[in-house]
């Protein structure tokens, strides 16, 4: 964090009169290059961090929580706690700040705001959806490597579309449908669990309905044995879907096909157990009827 008027220079110092307070990402970084900041309590490498951090081992997304009453800020990633620092009591207003040792750094600062906005994804197609996985807009897909079996847990579950990546286990949940959406619900699709699971490579998988079609259709997806970034779930056939911004799911922090999640506030996964509607016809004339043949609405009668 920093005070108004900081000129972005001299971040190699640790002086109480500096206009910035930082946590340096290096061995015992709380003892140097921290400006006016100082540790909020006795740091230990076992509870803070050991060595430098990067997006592969310590996490990619940094979350800074400022306590204005206590004059402290806490830094963590989606994977671990990094440290807690104090800043001077005389600072009445602070601003987000970041710095690096070279000129090739790019920072995207996102405010938590006054509260998460609800985009209504859980109400799609009659509702009943449970949110189980989330990734914000950014350079990487979901960290998960479980191929949507629901066996992983990471991050802190939050409703906000700007929250760090998170998932909760759902491998023991009773459900039969997936809902894949962008964070703003502009793009979405519903598929049965058995359509998502299984092994396939560029093969047609059934989509029950989507933001682009009201009825069922098929799209070619990937879910291969040796590829932990799978499944690739898209509104249209995988080859070409990336360029159109139609890919709604990818894993293992993959960097490909990110157009939809970058432009539409990230990506999310929901599940639900859809119970078939009661067949009113079976109650006619006292009931007791057994359904033996069916044909959906369309242009053709029964195949038999």
Image (cartoon, rainbow, N blue to C red):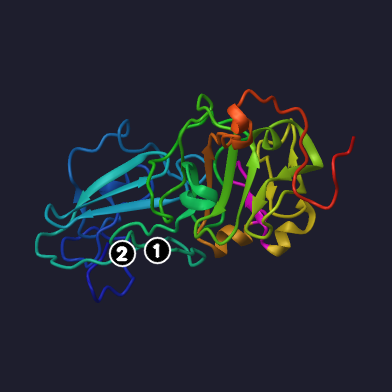
How crowded pointer 1 is (Cα within 10 Å; few <14, some 14-19, many 20+) is rated as few
SS of the residue at dot 1? loop
Q: In the image, which disc is placed on residue 225?
A: none
x, y (%) of residue 265? 50, 60
Measured along the vertical axis of the image, is residue 94 above or below residue 290?
Answer: below
**Which residue is denoted by mark 1 in the rendering?**
109
x, y (%) of residue 260? 61, 60
Q: Is 227 on the left or on the right of 157, as rendered?
A: right
Query: Overall secondary structure of the magenta stretch?
Result: loop
Measured along the vertical axis of the image, is residue 275 above or below residue 69?
Answer: above
Residue 294 seen from this side = yes
Rounded to the nearest whole Å, what is the CA distance between mark 2 and mark 1? 7 Å
Seen from the viewer's position, the closer of residues 296 and 166 is 296
- Magenta-drawn segment: 245-257
Quadrant including the C terminus: top right
Quadrant including the N terminus: bottom left
Measured along the vertical axis of the image, is residue 104 above or below residue 124?
Answer: below
Q: Is residue 25 magenta?
A: no
Question: Residue lying farthest left?
Answer: 90
Residue 145 seen from this side = no
SS of the residue at dot 2? loop
**Residue at position x 58%, y 27% in the image:** 286
Question: Residue lying farthest right?
Answer: 304
x, y (%) of residue 109? 40, 63
Q: Is 149 on the left or on the right of 156, as rendered?
A: right
Instruction: Looking at the image, tell me whether mark 2 or mark 1 is earlier in sequence order.
Output: 2
**Residue at position x 67%, y 58% in the image:** 246
**Which residue is denoted by mark 2 in the rendering?**
96
């Amino acid at each position: 964090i920093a005070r108004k008027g900081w000129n972005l220079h001299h971040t190699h110092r640790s002086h109480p009169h500096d206009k910035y307070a930082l946590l340096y990402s290096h061995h015992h970084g709380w003892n140097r290059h921290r400006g006016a900041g100082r540790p909020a309590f006795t740091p230990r490498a076992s509870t803070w961090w050991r060595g430098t951090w990067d997006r592969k081992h310590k996490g990619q997304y940094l979350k800074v929580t400022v306590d204005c009453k206590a004059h402290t800020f806490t830094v963590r990633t989606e994977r671990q706690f990094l440290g807690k620092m104090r800043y001077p009591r005389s600072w009445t207003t602070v601003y987000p700040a970041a710095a690096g040792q070279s000129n090739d750094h790019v920072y995207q600062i996102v405010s938590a705001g006054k509260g998460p906005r609800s985009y209504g994804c859980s109400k799609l197609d009659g509702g009943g959806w449970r949110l189980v996985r989330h990734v914000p807009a950014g350079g990487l897909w979901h960290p998960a490597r479980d191929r949507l079996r629901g066996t992983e847990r990471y991050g802190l579950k939050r409703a906000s579309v700007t929250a760090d990546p998170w998932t909760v286990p759902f491998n023991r949940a009773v459900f039969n449908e997936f809902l894949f959406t962008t964070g703003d619900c502009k793009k979405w699709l519903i598929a049965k669990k058995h359509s998502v699971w299984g092994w396939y490579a560029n093969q047609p998988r059934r989509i029950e309905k989507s933001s682009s079609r009201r009825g069922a259709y098929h799209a070619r997806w990937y879910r291969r044995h040796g590829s932990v970034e799978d499944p690739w779930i898209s509104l249209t056939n995988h080859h070409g879907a990336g360029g159109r911004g139609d890919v709604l799911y990818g894993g293992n922090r993959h960097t490909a096909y990110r157009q939809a999640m970058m432009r539409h506030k990230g990506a999310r996964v929901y599940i639900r157990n859809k119970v078939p509607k009661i067949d009113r016809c079976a109650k006619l004339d006292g009931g007791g009827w057994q359904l033996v043949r069916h044909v959906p609405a369309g242009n053709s009668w029964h195949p038999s």
